[in-house]
Amino acid sequence: MFLEKIEKENDIKQIGKENWDALAQEIREFLIRKISVTGGHLGSNLGAVELTMALHLALNLPEDKIIWDVGHQSYTHKILTGRKDGFESLRQFHGMSGFPKRKESCCDAFETGHSSTSISAGLGLVKARDILGEKNTVVSVLGDGSLTGGMAYEALNNASKLDTNFIVVLNDNNMSISENVGGVSKYLNNIRTATGYLDLKAGIYNALLGTKRGNSTIDKIRRAKSSFKQLVIPGMFFEDMGLTYLGPVDGHDIEAMVKVINEAKRVKGPVLVHVITQKGKGYAPAERHPARFHGAEPFDIETGLPSKPRTIANYTDVFSTVMCKLGQRDEKIVAITAAMPDGTGLKRFRNMYPERFFDVGIAEEHAVTFAAGLAAGGLKPIVAVYSSFLQRAYDQILHDVCLQNLPVVFAVDRAGLVGSDGETHQGIFDFTYLTGIPNMHVCAPKNKWELSDMMKFAVGLEAPIAIRYPRGTAYDGLKEYRAPVELGRAEWIYREWEIALLAVGSMVKTGEQVREQLKSKGYHVSLINARFLKPIDEDVVKEVCREHALIVTMEENVFCGGYGEKVLDCMNRNNLNNSCLNICVPDAYVEHGNVELLKKEIGIDADSIVKRIEDSLKSR
């Protein structure tokens, strides 16, 4: 077992070249075995095994730096830096993260979780290296999907000015950049990166720079060289941006990749290494269904099927069904996603109405402004996006949608705590960043029926609106309470006195549990479904303050800018002096772990809330 010899960074260099393929196979078997139990990102990691091995063989960690774009393909990197024991608790509370974490290892140079950021971060590390006079190598690794994000091109444009080494590895697992045109490309790569060639090139340029007509001669040489390269090199787009292009290279040929990375290290300037890989490599179910195994739940290794098949619809399923019905009723309904047709539930809409479905790639900023354009053109766009990804398009929401008061509907999936993906994916800030924008309306359904009602309400509003709903099973309770949705109006569910629970969205279910516990202890408790975060129902706030001694707000969002803060503001402006207890997520990042466990840890589960209410009543 060669994997047993890997206990810390650089141990891979003790493995002989003849055993590299065997180690790669062991790593794949290890990943499949572990992720089948814990769940996690499988397909992307299986495709990057040899690539990661080659980087570790060619570099010296932690002095050299690897920045993993998104970071969901860093499992092999974790194994090769001595963290294979951490896979027992992968993505579990207080366990190893599924993404790079600087606190986990000095070999994790930069923390990531969102797409298209690695080149910018790498460029920053390069400039820091140069200013400090250090000599280490910096490598940014990103998938071809990340090149659909504009930030990557902004960074490439900036990187083109470099006159020191910076390596960008493009992990292309869909052949979406270009095809290998044969031996000429490989031959030119070898020639252009050979030490003698680089020295000769630098010498000629330096000599010509001091002559009378040196600059014009250099320009002619460059133009002639580029004209020939246009015919034979598939990476001319990158070359024209100012990067040296190497590749394509087989991403599963470790020896070839070690060679090209070492060649790239000799380039004085930015260099892009184009690597071709297969997502899910080495595991047939993942090769056949790469989307399903992108973020896999625990599964049976033999069949690839989930260990615990889902039998109850989740909120994404409900949204999917409603979208198809809306599309059938109104031909002006169009749907936009940022590379997440499956994750956001738009796959069925795409199949039914392909001409009204738009996948813009990993480009949330473009998605929002594109939707604004569709709305300005007379259509009814619905942008389906995860809460933690929508925050990337804040300026576009503010400037392009809300400033013009355009009727764009934001279906904000995975709002609140999402669990195993951790800090970069927890949707606990959307109330805060959305409700501060003029013209924006924000609401949250208590159950699956209300999600359907809110979607129908939203498409007829003729103004920007966000509907935020959680990840996981769609709550089916309280379906007898289905008052029509009215802008800025809350919904009374149980009306008593003494304690008033004002709950938002997913917390209505928790509020029902809290009420049952308090009732069993002899308290009189009202439960109100807030429905709208902007505008909040100030009449309800005033009403509950007249009839209750203690007001309790409940939300799955941070306090700053959240519902509780808005209720307090309403009370202060109206001189309402009732006691108010705010149940919310702390103003902090929340780590990965099971959602129910996280709720208990931060004090927003039913038992914790009951205790806090009783403590508040006693202190009062």
Image (cartoon, rainbow, N blue to C red):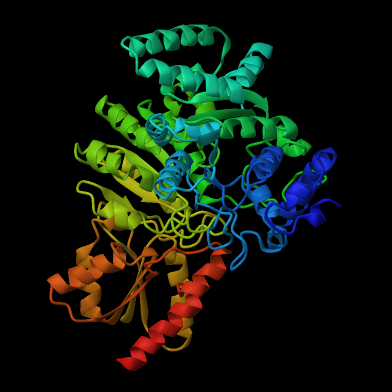
Rendering coords of residue 245 (x, y %): 54, 23
Q: Nearer the viewer, residue 496 or 26?
A: 26
Q: Is residue 220 left or right of residue 87?
A: left
Q: Nearer the viewer, residue 271 or 420?
A: 271
Q: Nearer the viewer, residue 241 or 218?
A: 218
Rendering coords of residue 596 (x, y %): 55, 67
Rendering coords of residue 142 (x, y %): 54, 37
Locate residue 156: give its quadrant. top left
Please state the total of marks drawn on the protein image. 0
Instruction: Check the picture and name the quadrant holding the C terminus.
Output: bottom left
* Residue 307 seen in the figure: no
Q: Relative to 71, does residue 535 appear above or below in the rendering? A: below
Q: Nearer the viewer, residue 156 or 222?
A: 222
Rendering coords of residue 541 (x, y %): 23, 69
Q: Relative to 354, does residue 585 appear above or below in the rendering? A: below
Locate residue 223: give its quadrant. top left
Residue at 54 percent across and 27 percent down: it is: 351
* Residue 127 seen in the figure: yes
Q: Relative to 452, does residue 373 appear above or below in the rendering? A: above
Residue at 47 percent across and 73 percent down: it is: 602
